[in-house]
Image (cartoon, rainbow, N blue to C red):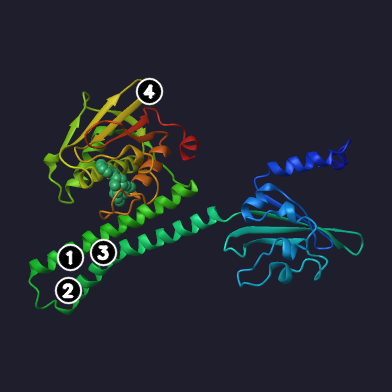
Amino acid sequence: MSDQSRQPVEPPLAPGVYAALLEQLPEGVVVVDAGRRLVLANHRAERLTGIHLTDRVGQDICEALPLLNADGRSYWETDNPWGGLRTRSGSPEQRLVLADGRSVLAATRHIRAGSDRTLQWLVMTMRSTTVRDRIESETSALVTTIAHELRAPLGAVRGFSRTLRNRWDQLRDDQKLWMLDAIDTDAARLQRQVGELLDISRLDTGRLMLRSREVDLLSLVRTGIERVVSTGVDADRFRVVSQFDEVRLTADADRLTQVLSNLLENAVRHGRGTVTVTVQLSRREVQLDVSDEGPGIAPEHRSLVFTRFWQARGRGGNGLGLYVVHGLVAAHGGRVEVLDLPGGATFRMTLPRHTPEPEEAAS
Ligand SMILES: Nc1ncnc2c1ncn2[C@@H]1O[C@H](COP(=O)(O)OP(=O)(O)O)[C@@H](O)[C@H]1O
Ligand SMILES: [Mg+2]
């Protein structure tokens, strides 16, 4: 920064302008003077604390804004910015509680002056805890989901391998083979689930990498159907409608197969009847619809289905499939939506025929 930019602004803003600017801040702001008196608070601070702070200007801050630490002691008494080290420049953000149980995330800055660095002003900024609370509760929901989902297949893998080991001589070959197959199936399920969890973390942090090449969408549809059929679903339930023999586009084949098998599996599990995949082409885009003849998705739920954990009614599953679908399609520069059509659910995925450059796609 040049010296010039540090010059005071001339003419200074009128006091009323500062107050008006303060009201525009997204955070709550509270200012306390050297005598521990509340001198200023914006509207946002009043909303966050539920206290009419402007009525308490001039009061001792301990009474005007009684904040408590996590251990229930007075924040102002414990933090004691007026005593203590004169080199302190503030305190980091922490969760503070009010008498009525509300909480805020608050941080302070100390404004000191003179060679003895006495505290002249204390500025506290505060924001709502709801975002952090939501992240914390989502994280704990995710951990519960993971633990829940991994437990069943892990239990089966351990049980079968122990039986094989302890009763090897009593078991017939066909029984041994059957158990080994069961172990293999459950291990594959675990692998898929762990892969899906890694995808979620990659999508959340924008680290998902696509390995795009030219692929035929119709053969990916067939692979997706085979994958669902291999879990025991009747192959006759699927119908593919397209006037083309081949639909070429640039995409990550594994990721698109994952998207397709998720949509197909949902159509089978949450829907009913025949599952129809329709592929259409326009000049720039490919459109793929997956529709079923089940109960469909209520209009008021259509914006929710792609969010984490959302389920109309918990019928197994974890509510993460469509969240991953949405993220993977977006990474391809496409979009996915629920169409407003009568009878059953129709999910439409629209992809560009030319996939954007990697840096565009990764964002
Ligand atoms: N084809 C469908 N028909 C009706 N409801 C569906 C369909 N696909 C998805 N849903 C609803 O959307 C929810 C979220 O789907 P998803 O994210 O794949 O999670 P999961 O399949 O694990 O429940 C499902 O629980 C279901 O309520
Ligand atoms: Mg699903």
Identify the image quadrant of the N terminus: top right
Reading the image, the residue beneath label 1 is 180
Residue at image mark 3: 153
Tell me the kind of residue under disc 1: Leu
216 sits left or right of 132 in the view: left
Q: Is residue 253 found left or right of 111 in the rendered image?
A: left
Q: Residues within 10 Å of mark 1 (few under 14, many from 20)?
A: some
Q: CA distance from mark 2 to mark 3?
A: 16 Å
Q: Amino acid at mark 4?
A: Arg
Q: Is residue 181 visible?
A: yes
Q: Residue 143, position in %: x, y?
A: 40, 62
The CA distance from mark 1 to mark 3 is 13 Å
Q: Mark number for residue 164?
A: 2
Q: What is the CA distance from the residue labelled 2 to the residue labelled 4?
A: 56 Å
Q: Give me the residue at 28% from left, 51% from top.
A: 313
- Mark 1 in CB contact with mark 2 (< 8 angstroms): yes
Establish whether ligand 1 lies closer than 8 Å to the Cβ of label 4: no
**Label located before the other in sequence (1 or 2):** 2
Any atom of ligand 1 within 8 Å of the CB at mark 1?
no
State which mark lies toward you, 1 or 3. Answer: 3
Tell me the CA gap for discs 3 and 4: 44 Å
